[in-house]
Amino acid sequence: MNSENQNREMNPIRVGVLGFGGLGQAAARVLAPKTEMKWVAAADKKGCAYNSEGLNPDSCINTYHHQGSVGFVEPWGILCDDGIGELIKTAAVDGYFLALPNLPNTFMASVAQQFIKSGWRGVLVDAMKRTSAVEQLLELQTELQAAGITYMTGCGATPGLLTAAAALGAQSYAEIHSVKITFGVGIANWEAYRATIREDIAHMPGYDVATAMAMSDAEVEALLDKTDGKITLENMEHADDIMLELAGICPRDRVTVGGVVDTRNPKKPLSTNVQITGRTFEGKISTHTFTLGDETSMAANVCGPAFGYLKAGVKLHRRGIYGLFTAAEVMPHFVR
Ligand code: NAD
């Protein structure tokens, strides 16, 4: 190993978190005990913060809660309209987790384009959910490759952990008949995950991304009051389908996603699972079921995989492998 490679192996991966809401804050906490990654940068809608020696999760989360932006964090914060652009210009970061709302449905692709245009090189990871949103990134494949960006998409829980589990479980079969993802999410209050809840409402009958995005907080409250705080979803437009199709597992119409979100109780309303049904080479039809532990939160099941894929992305990037990858194509690496 030459000395440059040795240095890279020893130095922690410098990580930035874009979006500092529910998932962004959980991401900071997930990273705190890690030695292979160092959390150095964060951005939200009103500003950003950067410290090459590492940011303190408690002080950033406190500041965000009391003052509304990491831009107020002393002395590392800056208040500005384009925290992402500011970090691209000034921060030394190997990889970013995009814990951003994808509202409108084109927002994440526009952030990817901002990175491409800036000349920044490194790894980007998202936990994006909609099939049409991943399709927009697929169109950027050539530009991402040319820019020297390794972009890992759909790397949360679903899509993400469960899609990867389906890709793994499929290996027992000669043909895949169905992949059925059912999720249960329990959160104590919807305000902790506003984008997640608005994006879920956008899947309800009679709603779309534009109407959910335009809803005031009071309108979201009123809707949740009618359903006792629960959102029940079926046949969602979820990128697990295109990711499994791209990975060659099965056509997208064999993949279904639905679930229940309880916004008033951290206990999961049902156990999150993926069922992979197929035919073995002997002609037997069977179903594998992978069920997440009920004690694991949405934040744990999104942020853990996101950083596992970020580490995998950094390895690809260091080998000169750029472009778009999905969670069903690459194994996440465990971050110590
Ligand atoms: P949130 O509403 O709690 O927080 C969003 C954050 O993004 C806020 O800090 C806000 O200030 C910031 N932000 C908004 N616009 C910005 C901009 N232009 N520049 C910088 N920052 C900006 O969001 P959340 O509930 O944590 O969800 C984040 C995303 O994660 C959502 O898109 C959601 O769908 C996704 N998600 C994915 C999974 C999965 O399993 N794949 C699960 C849950 C959530």
Image (spheres, rainbow, N blue to C red):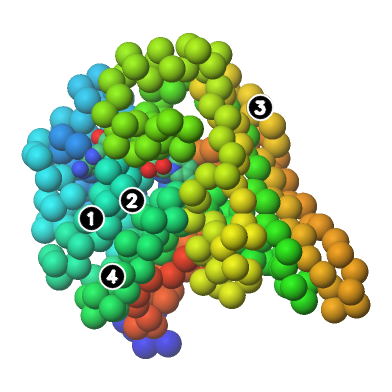
Q: Residue drawn at (37%, 37%), measured in percent from left and top?
A: 208
Whether the residue under disc 1 has CB within 8 Å of ligand 1: yes
| Residue 140, disc | 4
Q: Looking at the image, is 286 positioned above or below residue 187?
A: below
Q: Are marks 2 and 1 in contact (CB under 8 Å)?
A: yes
Quote the CA–CA distance across marks 2 and 3.
27 Å
Q: How many labels does the image show?
A: 4
Viewer-proximal residue among 211 and 149: 211
Q: Are marks 3 and 1 in contact (CB under 8 Å)?
A: no
Q: Mark 2 points at which residue?
A: 98
Quote the CA–CA distance across marks 2 and 1.
9 Å
Q: Are marks 4 and 2 in contact (CB under 8 Å)?
A: no
Dot 1, crowdedness within 10 Å: few (<14), some or many (≥20)? Answer: some
Q: Mark 1 points at which residue?
A: 111
Q: Name the residue under label 3.
A: 269
Across and down, in percent, residue 188 comes to 51, 20
Q: Which of marks 3 and 4 is nearer the N terminus?
A: 4
**Residue type highlighted by circle 4:** Leu
